[in-house]
């Protein structure tokens, strides 16, 4: 076999490349791990070899292409998930090309595999009436209900990502003049998000009820440990189902923690906040990412339409006055 073995390269990719050189986040490492766990199982079944006997030559473009088709067909992965798996595979083969140049041509073929195109749908968000119904859904006579109300309120006011929300500690909330929440966001970027006075008061009351130290999680489970992302998603779905009884429009929406983030952005946009400020608020790498909210906002489009004067020309159909143009028109 040419060069270094596949198991050795894969282990070095995770230990040296991702963990040591790139200091990748736990989420990135977990995503890459899951991709290669699926890929190795698929390749082992296709090649009739145990995972430790697989070679780089076995992971060619045909097998990887079949694997990507397999995860779409059998696991129900969409184009976005497929492209994410392919990105992890590409990252590994870039490392292989750098570490063992004997596989350079093989790696170039894999790196040339294209992403799959997909329909970019408009974002789902909650309007003011739906937000009010969702915030009123938790039963605040119980400890868990008070926690859930604060979670929803902070999520809707700050627009924090799910991972940022569950990782908040009691010491990350700063009161007084310029009250805000500190968080470590995507890409290890620290940012501070201001709090409205009403939100700050609710958080002050919650911290007294919570009675946690500065390093303890702001939103804890019944057992006292950090609230998981699955628990957060369940929390949102549960209270959305309750709120749909008083607000029927919620019944037709699939609401997730990220929907609350979209709702924050749309509220800021409706109140005339500049896109660059919204990008800073949400922790976007680029202002271009914030463009999705402009596409989703029908109010802005209707306001733009109201400023356009109606056309005074009479409707009619163009008819070419040349035989060649008439021929082409008839095709």
Image: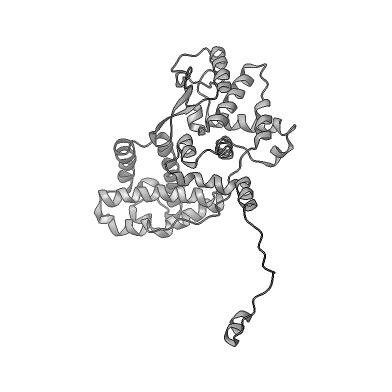
Residue 137 in the image: state x and y as whole percent.
68, 26
Question: In the rendering, at what x and y percent does residue 180 appear?
Answer: 48, 24
**Is 160 left, or right, of 144 in this rendering?**
left
Name the image quarter holding the N terminus.
Answer: bottom left
Q: Residue at x 70, y 42 (%)?
A: 252
| Residue 239 in view here | no
Tell me residue 160's x, y (percent): 51, 32
Q: Is 49 rendered above or below residue 33?
A: below
> Nearest the camera: 34 or 306?
306
- Does residue 16 sit above or below 183 in this rendering? below
- The image quadrant that residue 287 belongs to is top left
Q: Quadrant of residue 316?
A: bottom right
Residue at the (26%, 50%) spot, across then down: 98
| Residue 261: image location, x then y, percent | 55, 36
Residue at image coords 48%, 56%: 116
If the image is split into quadrants, where does the C terminus sit?
bottom right
Asked if residue 155 lies left or right of residue 98, the reply is right
* In-front residue for pair 133/80: 133
The relative height of residue 13 versus residue 112 in the rendered view (above or below) is above
Q: How is the image coloured?
A: one colour
Confirm whether residue 124 shows in the render.
yes
Most extreme residue toward the bottom is: 323
């Amino acid at each position: 076999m040419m060069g270094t073995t596949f198991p050795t390269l894969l282990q070095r990719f995770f230990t040296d490349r991702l963990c040591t050189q790139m200091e990748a986040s736990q989420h990135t490492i977990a995503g890459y791990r899951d991709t290669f766990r699926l890929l190795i199982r698929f390749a082992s079944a296709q090649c009739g070899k145990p995972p430790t006997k697989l070679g780089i030559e076995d992971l060619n473009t045909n097998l990887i292409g079949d694997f990507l088709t397999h995860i779409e067909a059998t696991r129900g992965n969409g184009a976005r998930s497929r492209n994410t798996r392919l990105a992890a595979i590409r990252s590994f083969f870039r490392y292989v090309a750098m570490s063992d140049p004997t596989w350079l041509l093989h790696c170039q073929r894999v790196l040339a595999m294209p992403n799959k195109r997909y329909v970019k749908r408009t974002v789902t968000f909650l309007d003011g009436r739906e937000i009010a119904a969702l915030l009123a859904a938790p039963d605040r006579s119980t400890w868990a209900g008070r926690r859930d109300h604060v979670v929803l309120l902070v999520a809707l006011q700050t627009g924090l990502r799910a991972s940022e929300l569950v990782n908040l500690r009691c010491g990350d909330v700063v009161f007084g003049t310029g009250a805000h929440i500190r968080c470590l966001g995507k890409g290890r970027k620290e940012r501070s998000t201001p709090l409205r006075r009403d939100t700050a008061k609710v958080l002050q009351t919650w911290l007294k009820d919570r009675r946690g130290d500065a390093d303890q999680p702001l939103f804890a489970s019944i057992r006292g440990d950090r609230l998981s992302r699955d628990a957060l998603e369940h929390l949102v779905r549960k209270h959305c189902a309750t709120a749909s009884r008083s607000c029927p429009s919620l019944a037709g929406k699939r609401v997730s923690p990220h929907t609350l983030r979209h709702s924050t952005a749309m509220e800021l946009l409706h109140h005339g906040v500049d896109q660059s400020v919204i990008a800073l608020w949400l922790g976007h790498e680029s202002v271009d990412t914030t463009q999705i909210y402009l596409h989703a906002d029908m109010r802005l489009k209707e306001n733009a339409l109201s400023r356009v004067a109606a056309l005074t020309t009479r409707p009619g159909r163009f008819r070419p006055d040349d035989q060649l143009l008439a021929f082409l028109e008839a095709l």
